[in-house]
Amino acid sequence: MSSHPEAAGRPRDRIIEGRAVEDRVLRQLAEAVLFEGLAARDAAPGDGRLHWRLGPRRFRARGSVGPFGRPRLVPGTVEMAGVEGGWQDAPLAALVEALPASVEHRERLLAELRQTVALCRWNAGALPVPERRALPFAALDAALWEGHPYHPGFKARTGFTLDDHARYGPEAARPFRLDWLALPRSRVALSLPGGEEAFWRGVLGSDRDRLLRRLHEAGHSPGTHAVLPVHPWQMRHLAQGEPLRARLAEGSAVPLGPAGPRYRASQSLRTLHACDDPRAPSVKLALSVVSTSSLRILDPHCVLTAPALSDWLAGIVAGDPRLARMSILREHAAVIADRDGPLAGRLAAIWRESPDLEPGEAAIPFNALCCCEPDGTAFAAPWLERYGLAAWLDRLVEVAVLPVWHLLAAHGVALEAHGQNMILVHRDGWPERVILRDFHESAEYAPDFLAGVPPVPDLGAIDPAHAGPADDRFHAMRAADTLAELVTDSLFVFSLSEVTHLLARMHGLDEAGFWTGLGRRLRRHAAEHGIEDRFARLSVKASGVDAPRLRVEALLARKLGLEEARCSHLVPNALAPNALPSPLTLLRTGS
């Protein structure tokens, strides 16, 4: 780690104000540039800094390189060489301008980064910094303001004004009701449990009658039209453009107004938690907003298949006693309009179960573990003091990491288990079990690698896009090592490594030792459960989980529209038996 005093004394993810907001965005952009190999890396002159070039421009920053080759730069130290010599604080725009991408992509990225800065500054100026350790799950899910620790545009929300941010962002936690829209039945497809009328009555209560009256007043009936919820921002956005504006004008689409229970946004923005009943399902809605890496609509071919897929996953988990510490939140209902039309993916909803907790249990999103509280201490600091770092971290691996790995290695199913998709259940801070969520676009399996699972549901019968042999497009992958990439990428490289980085800085964790030990533990798990041959199949490529390097998605390169070959890259594998000893040397020499 760097010996610079800021590296130890200044929490990486504190909620910050003023110039520090832009510093964070700049730092994360520089870290991504270095990690993904987008810059020419210079040999360091021994000054404790990392040096790199983008075209004619030279940059440097204090920092080090951690497990998996992740650069960890010290806040406020990214500098650019001046034209006449000397170093100065690097302007964010200058670093973006130097990126190897088209003008269009650079301008779009810069706009997203400036929006991120603006929304962070609004939060700092308008809202009190929350004390979060005692918050119930849904409130905590909204109060994790920090955003993604890798994406530089971690709060872009393009399309949101400051008023929209205040109204619909999770930070202000304002409740709102969903808008409802009626469309001809030929344009709407549903997958609802227990029958359509009973489901809508359960969601809307007495408001269902009010919506039906409005539908009749417009000259339609439940026989001709189906309804679906729409995020209020999305309704306003779509009503301003074609083709919805034309359908509203002709009367075939009928806006029914707000109705039903109140919701608040979660940290993912488009997933909403019910305000008044923590046991009520959450709902995930399409939003035509870019946040972090992508447009937050819903893949039109992964909406109706969500209930069948999550029922299948639940059956796998329930059928293996070795997964007793894992459960999943089922996506039990779905509706989509215009699935194959011009509004595909922009009018859709998926309902998901909420965590079911036993007396004495509490739940936190996993990414809370890489956050700090307003006093600068780690979120988990009281737990570490109570139980000890080694014992607590060992237990975290046992209940949260090994089940995800076992699902992959023993059964052939990979989940995108990043910080938002994992929920840690604990008792007074002691990890008890893990809950996984959000599968409709990310769960993967390889048909010839499945073992001990119920029959795969016929997703092609639900949506024809899923028919045919495995082709790496949706859930069915052609090779087992592709599954391994999803888990190592999401769970290890971009999630758990953030936790260990914080614990190393603030609680003295031997980070390299932890990762080497975790690799041994995964191999021991395979031996204990008789799945060593399956473990080996996850490493058939030179970049497999037991090889010196891992293949990782290059998130910034993909966002910049670079060629496909540059949208993934090899990184040192901290889990390998002979992990590369000095990724810092590799970075500094450019090898």
Image: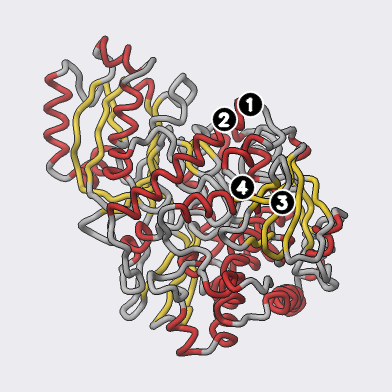
Q: Earlier in the sequence, mark 4 or mark 2?
A: 4
Q: Badge 2 is on which residue?
A: 107
Amino acid type at image mark 3: Leu
Which label is found at residue 148?
A: none
> Distance of mark 2 from mark 3, alpha carbons?
20 Å
Q: Quadrant of the C terminus?
A: bottom right
Mark toward the start of the polypeptide (3 vs 4): 3
* Tag 4: amino acid: Ala
Label 4 neighbour load within 10 Å: few <14, some 14-19, many 20+:
many
How would you rate the neighbour count of disc 3 (Cα within 10 Å): few for under 14, some for 14-19, many for 20 or more? many
Across and down, in percent, residue 90 comes to 61, 47
Give me the C-alpha separation between circle 3 and circle 1. Answer: 20 Å
Q: CA distance from mark 2 to mark 1?
A: 6 Å
At horizontal 62% and vertical 39% (from top left) the residue drawn is 94
Q: Residue at x 31, y 74 (%)?
A: 134
Question: Label 4: which residue?
Answer: 90
Q: Position of residue 283 (x, y in %)?
A: 35, 47
Mark 3 or mark 1, which has the lower sequence index? 3
Amino acid type at mark 2: Glu
Q: Residues within 10 Å of mark 2 (few under 14, many from 20)?
A: some
> Residue 391: x percent and y percent?
57, 87
Tell me if 371 is positioned left or right of 355 in this view.
Answer: right
Q: Are marks 2 and 1 in contact (CB under 8 Å)?
A: yes
Front of the two marks 4 and 2: 4
Q: Is residue 493 left or right of residue 215?
A: right
Q: Is residue 38 visible?
A: no
Q: CA distance from mark 4 to mark 2?
A: 18 Å
Residue placed most toward the observer, 544 or 55: 55
Label at residue 34: 3
